[in-house]
Amino acid sequence: MPEENVRVAVRVRPFNRRERERNSTLIIDMNGATTEITDPAGNDEPRKFTFDYSFWSHDGSKEQADGYYGPDTSHPNGKKFADQKKVYNELGVAVLKNAWEGYNSTLFAYGQTGSGKSWSVVGYGINKGIVPMFCDDVFKQIEAKKAEGDKTEFEITFSMLEIYNEQVRDLLSSTARKGGLKVRQHPKLGFYAEGLQIVPVSDYADIERRMEEGTQNRTVASTKMNATSSRAHTIVGITFIQKFQNAAGEDTTKSAITNLVDLAGSERADSTGATGDRLKEGAAINQSLSCLGNVIAALADRSSGKNTRVPYRDSVLTKLLKNALGGNSKTIMIAALSPADINFDETLSTLRYADRAKQIKNSTSVNEDPTEQLIRELQEENEKLKAMLKSGNLEMVAGEDDDDDLTDEERAQIKAELEDQYKSILDKNAQEMEDMKKSFEDKLKEAELKGGGGSTDFAAIAEKKKTVPHLSNLNLDPQLSGHITHFVEGPETCVGSEGDIMFKGPSVVAKHAMIREEGGKYTIEPCEMTNRLVQNGKAVVAKQPLSHNDRLIFGTTQYYVFVNPKERDASKQKYPEVTFEMAQEEVAKKSGFDMSGENKSREDALLQEDMLEIMPAVEEANAISQELDKKMKFESMIVSPEARGEQTGRTEVMIKATNIETKHEWIWPKVKFMNRKYVMQEMYNDFLDGDDPWELPPEKDPFIDDINAEFHIGSVKIWLQSTAYMIAMKEQLDVIDFRGYEVGKINIELVPCNKSGKEYAEDEVFVEDTSELVGKELYFKLKLENAMGLPSRFTDLYAKYIFNLEQKPYETKKMANTINPQWNLNQVHGFAKVTTEDITFLQEGAIMLQVWGKQKPPKEKKTVNTKDALIKGAMTKGQSHNVNTNNKKVDPEKVKYMMKCAMLEKQNQHLEQKLVAMKRMLEEANKHKKKKLTVQLIHKIYHAPSNDAAEKCIALIPQEKDDSSSDSSSSSSSSSSSSSDEENKGKNKDAKKKKKPSSKSKRSKSPKATHPPKEKENEKKAVSKQTSNAIKNQNKSSSCVLL
Ligand SMILES: Nc1ncnc2c1ncn2[C@@H]1O[C@H](COP(=O)(O)OP(=O)(O)O)[C@@H](O)[C@H]1O
Ligand SMILES: [Mg+2]
């Protein structure tokens, strides 16, 4: 069989609205087959990749009158621009050619959510993607063949499925089967979804209807669980069968299966942040995608000659794509790239993924056999299966090489499933045989009788939408917006779970809101004041006019736009196209969150994206908690790395989950919360569907977290600058929690010491110029005495930290039943041979000490109702969204400032003492009319650790000999003449370092008086960067005393 590599295409989309608003930087460039990506943060060279196809769709296009994005010849990149037609011509046409020749093909789109996968695969409106163009072309080419007088019989079938959370859902069926379709393994066909509808289609319009039906079913499922679509994989399957007589006059069947796969957003493959969550459901959501990554890696390994096991069986997606990836299929992958700087990490990872995929080789063969033979084979196969079932002697269906290393347990499990499977295969084979014998016309007729094209008359609805006011759904996935239409007819229309317009969702009540029409004007009002209804981002409590293009949110998940064709057509206004994002943004804005795009750093932009995702999710989780009375309350908070007890990283959104009865709290990273939220949604849907029981056991309940889990109470940043000067420090520092509030104090000391921990009197070792330390040893002891006043709801209190680049954390002992744990940790840190990098670390770095504990069991459990508690909470806060944006209650930089000031004060004391000693030395020398002093003595006086010690040396001045020539032990100055100039020269040569301190100490005096007001100012500003810069500047200009 000929081998063929997986072909890989990359495509980069235009900036979206938000990216434009933020003046995003373009990080992708394409030249010929090369794609370059530039790290916006780094100075590294751009990274280069080459692919089989490179589609530049970023700029160089123009929207034509009909809405189609074609090349703009006047633009410098007009020639480079790849429109939908070009992409189809290069990728789709080849796939179609394969189908004609009888090869299976698979085309899949990979990339993060919003990168343009669906744009390429399905397309939007007139900008049709590969699937509709492919379908259109198939029928055109068939017609052309027929017109030429070709006697071949052509059959086309269509199927559409979705994989979400490892469940297969038939999108052509409006009734979802619980647990999804089973995935079976057929000896010849490989894996297939049992019972999936594979419908015959007669023309393009037929396919279009089927696709719309599938998309609508997806939308309905997705509105129940908003945002699921980005986590789902969609596979459109098109089978093309040609029946003709071969050269030998035999009836022959040539078949080709084409799979077009729109994968889930790749960002979900990364589950960091959810690690350690005992709830596995969250991880299952990514299972298919991460497994696809493993399969691709293994296949790439195999192509390079390694004998690696390919883990197809690990997920539903890889089972169904097994043929596409490692079997008989010509495969194309489109990697969709986001062009903006904020997506650098994701885009780079997409490029790497694509780079790996291109190494995979597949063996392909034409599926062409005499029909008789096919039928015979199926018959024989069935006879065999029947015999095996009868005898009970079951054998593995496909003993393939990748199954070699199955464990006994896996083997047993597979065996147990076999019987079931055999029956299923028997049915499938029988069905196939029957199908082969039937004419295509008959099959089409049958499908028609079953309600072909679905029960919905899409054309009629489209027509009615032109004149009748309606609510049109908005979905986070733009691909799913506008697929649900509720017409608003008559003077009064009630919306609610039991209304004229009917839908369910968290916080949607039976009679939720009322839309009224009077003289062509519309109004809307909630049926009860407490019903959650949001219009254009604002909560509605009383009757409001309802205008065309108004955004409406019912409950927390039902987003709609009101379309009033008459009003729209009569108005001169150009209405903007409403998107889900827009509706979300205006809610965020109205609750006081800064949604402007201007002057946003990459970090701020990422934070903004996170907030947009989190805010509605928190509302939804609270609404579900309330309806299911789960006693949990969720709040979002913005947390700086310092408040998380980390030294690096960006400011992130985290979720505080509180049990309103026990008052236990958990702080969840965003990913953990989002994963759990999906499980909450599923739980809620089971509740809505009346499933009994909808409750999950505690270990699976997304509302329950481990109360024995350790809780990160707060952190303290300990700056190390004093250690670079070998100065001892003793400080009481604030412990701050995630929100930036002080939750206790901690007493620490940093004391210079030797390697074995023997403490120095700092005056023995104090250095003025840190460069003196390079090459020498430097050790200090971190004494963590105790903490005081930690919150009483914790026990088993301990602290931990990591020093510098070390991996292993240092931990104190755990102290129970106290709020003032006495830890008495003494830990020596340091360097045997200090480098300049070490000095820089000590001067600018810090130790991030984290305080941990366990939550105590509640003393008494008050029974509260979730709804009452949440409503009460919202009232006191005055709004339903409460984002804790005000997190800098304690400015972590202030600690740095305090420690530096204390350190500088000490440093200054040292220098002043030296100055005094020098003055005293001169006085004494004058008094005793000494013209010369030995360097030795000056050295002793200068380095005397205290005033007393200095005085002791000064007392030796009278004994100094003016005629120093006799002093053989004295240094260079002793041999010089008596001129003071010469003497100074000698001193300079020998004791260069000594010059510095005197000048430093002089400088240090004057700013002492002038700086304190500045300090206050800085404190007030609480802007960390400014503060630290101010300190740096002060440091540079002098070593002043500030306090
Ligand atoms: N090549 C393109 N030209 C214009 N708009 C695009 C292009 N690719 C994507 N978009 C737009 O970007 C948004 C996200 O694209 P989509 O294909 O839905 O992403 P995904 O399926 O990867 O989540 C959509 O609004 C879509 O219209
Ligand atoms: Mg999509």
Image: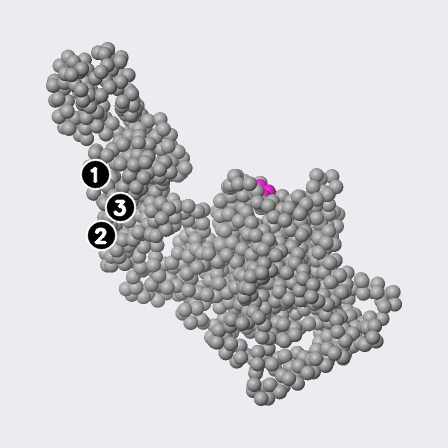
Q: In which quarter of the image is the N terminus?
A: bottom right
Residue 474 lies left or right of residue 1035; in this view the side is right
**Residue 228 at x, y percent in the picture:** 55, 61
The residue identified by callout 3 is 828
- The mark nearer the N terminus, 3 or 1, is 1
Q: Is residue 894 above or below residue 221?
A: above
What secondary structure is marked by label 3? Answer: strand
Q: Residue at x 68, y 51 (%)?
A: 53
The x and y percentages for residue 827 are 26, 48
Amino acid identity at mark 3: Val
Secondary structure type for disc 1: loop
What's the CA distance linking mark 2 and mark 3? 19 Å
Mark 2 or mark 1, earlier in chain:
1
Which region of the structure is painted magenta?
A: 24-28
Marked residue nearer the N-terminal end (2 or 3): 2
Q: Disc 2, ligand 1: is the CB inside 8 Å?
A: no
Asked if the residue under mark 3 is in contact with the one under mark 2, i.e. CB atoms within 8 Å, the reply is no
Compared across the picture, whether 811 is left or right of 594 comes to left
Q: Distance between the residues labelled 2 and 1?
A: 24 Å
| Residue located 37% across and 62% down the image | 659
Q: Where's residue 485, x and y in %?
A: 65, 62
Residue contact between numbered discs 3 and 1, judged by CB atoms under 8 Å: no
Mark 1 C-beta to ligand 1 under 8 Å: no
Mark 2 nearby-residue class (10 Å; few <14, some 14–19, many ≥20): some
Residue placed under numbered mark 1 in the picture: 760
Q: Is residue 488 visible?
A: no
Numbered tag placed on residue 822 in the rendering: 2
Tell us which disc is closer to us: 2 or 3. 3
State which quadrant residue 837 falls in.
top left
